[in-house]
Amino acid sequence: MTRTQGVVGAFDDMGFALAFQVTVRKPLGLPAELVNVPGATGRAANELGMDDELAACPRTLSHVVYFVPDAAKAEAFYVRLGFTVTDRLGGGPFLRPAGTSEHHTLFLIQTPPFRKGVEHFTFHMGGPTEVMVAGTRFVQKGYESFWGPGRHKLGSNWFWYFNSPLGCHVEYDADMDLHDPSWTPRDLPMGAENSQYFLLKSSEKWAPGGPPPSGVRDRKAV
């Protein structure tokens, strides 16, 4: 165990470095993404739902996902630290710590012993529109879309994952489920049907008449 400037660090039973530090969560007073829906109060007259200047910046760190060689052992460790299991997918637990009702801040995926480490980390956005806008801007800057956009089944959050130069994936998400102690965890097998309700695919922009002929697109790319 080490101690540096108020941070207490240690390693768990599987070799992952951990650190504990007393922090104070700052309240956010940011408005939610507005939607114009029949029968509900939405945007005011002349208030645009989208414009080219939308900031679409991350609001908070949403969650971290680890590959672990023993998901049950890792789950027991975090439960001792006060985490609660919300759901399980393929035996891997979605965990939330005391002090938050978000579906998960940590997800553990069972993998072979030779494969462990960070799979991805995620940033909360202001809503699905911000996920789509931020993701589109990522693609336009040359980052490779890995998975999404779409909407998860467990947690219900919108998602879009990207390959990153950090050796792991990075995700934007929005609109995650909230749970309290009355929630009963679900246990679903790993698979495409349980990973998302739907999955979209990023592609080049094109007009209602259809995408340009392949030859035109090829010349444009060159």
Image (tube, rainbow, N blue to C red):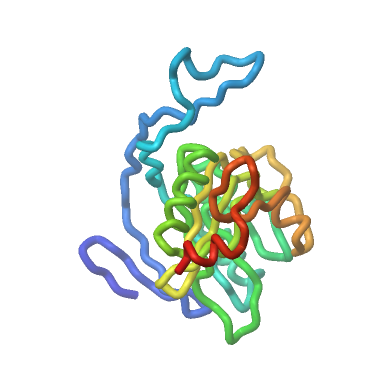
Q: Position of residue 187 (x, y in %)?
A: 76, 56
Instruction: Report which quarter residue 10 is drawn in.
Output: bottom left
User: Relative to the observer, which residue lies in front, 134 or 100?
Assistant: 134
Where, by quadrant of the figure, is residue 180 drawn?
top right
Q: In this view, does 99 lie above or below 112?
A: above
Up-down relation of residue 138 to residue 128 (above or below):
below
Q: In which quarter of the image is residue 21?
A: bottom left
Give coordinates of residue 199: x percent, y percent.
Answer: 68, 52
- Seen at 72% across and 65% down, the residue is 91
At which x and y percent is residue 183?
A: 69, 41
Quarter of the C terminus within the rendering: bottom left
Residue visible at 37% across and 65% down in the picture: 19
In front here: 121 or 213?
A: 213
Residue 213 drawn above or below residue 198: below
Horizontal placement of 81 versus 57: left or right? right
Judging depth in this view, the residue of 150 and 47 nearest the camera is 47
In the rendered image, which quarter contains the N terminus? bottom left
Relative to 68, is 55 on the left or the right? left
Of all residues, the one furthest to the left in this rendering is 5
- Tell me, yes or no, if residue 80 can be seen here: no
Residue 11 versus residue 221 in the image, above or below: below
Relative to residue 18, is residue 204 drawn left or right? right
Q: Which residue is drawn at 48% across and 51% down?
A: 136
Give the residue drawn at x 35%, y 35%: 27
Horizontal and vertical percent position of residue 9: 34, 69
